[in-house]
Image (tube, rainbow, N blue to C red):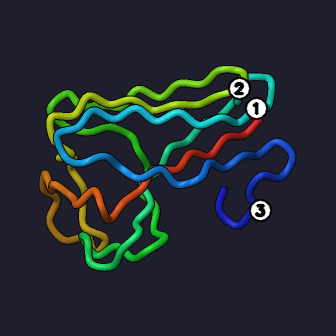
Amino acid sequence: MTGEAPNQPGRWESPLFPLPANGTNLAVVATHGRGHVPRQMRWVLVSTATGELGFLPGDELEVVGGNNSTNPTCWANATQVGLAMNAATWNWSFTQKTGASTANLTFMTTRWALKCYCDW
């Protein structure tokens, strides 16, 4: 999806959604209004600040799962897409951008936002 204009026919991109504070359950719903379920949906975390784990503003991390049974549930219907996650803490396992150590790193929710891409 990189390099293509957002929201062209067959493609949709959500606005950025701020993350809730650590320890808060997550439920994000975005309206695409296309009238049918997308054939592909992809949620990403977007870096909004410099200095976290070596990532720069605009860098994107694929949302594929967490640890401690905090895997997200991603869903879609004819008009909306959503992501829900029961999270005691935002403690996901990331490898730093430089390839340095992988650890369960509690990232600062004020430095990241969620975004969804869909294709039909």
The residue depicted at 39 percent of the width and 40 percent of the height is: 64
Q: Position of residue 68 (x, y in %)?
A: 14, 32
For label 1, count other residues whose C-alpha is less than 10 Å away and answer few (under 14), some (14-19) or many (20+).
few
Q: Amino acid at mark 3?
A: Ala
Quadrant where the N terminus sits is bottom right
19 is higher (above) or lower (below) than 37: below
Q: Position of residue 91 (x, y in %)?
A: 17, 47
80 is higher (above) or lower (below) than 8: above
Q: Amino acid at mark 2?
A: Thr
Nearest to the observer: residue 57 or residue 66: 57
Q: Which mark is residue 33?
A: 1
Q: Earlier in the sequence, mark 3 or mark 1?
A: 3
Q: Is residue 89 left or right of residue 12?
A: left
Q: CA distance from mark 2 to mark 1?
A: 4 Å
Q: Which mark is residue 79?
A: 2
Res. 55 image quadrant: bottom left
Q: Is residue 21 left or right of residue 45?
A: left
Q: Earlier in the sequence, mark 2 or mark 3?
A: 3
Q: Position of residue 4 (x, y in %)?
A: 75, 62
Q: Say which element carries label 2.
A: loop
Q: Is residue 101 left or right of residue 19?
A: left
Q: Position of residue 93 (x, y in %)?
A: 21, 50
Q: Which residue is mark 3?
A: 5
Q: Say which element carries label 3.
A: loop
For label 3, count other residues whose C-alpha is less than 10 Å away and answer few (under 14), some (14-19) or many (20+).
few
Q: Residue furthest right?
A: 9
| Number of residue marks | 3
Q: CA distance from mark 3 to mark 1?
A: 18 Å
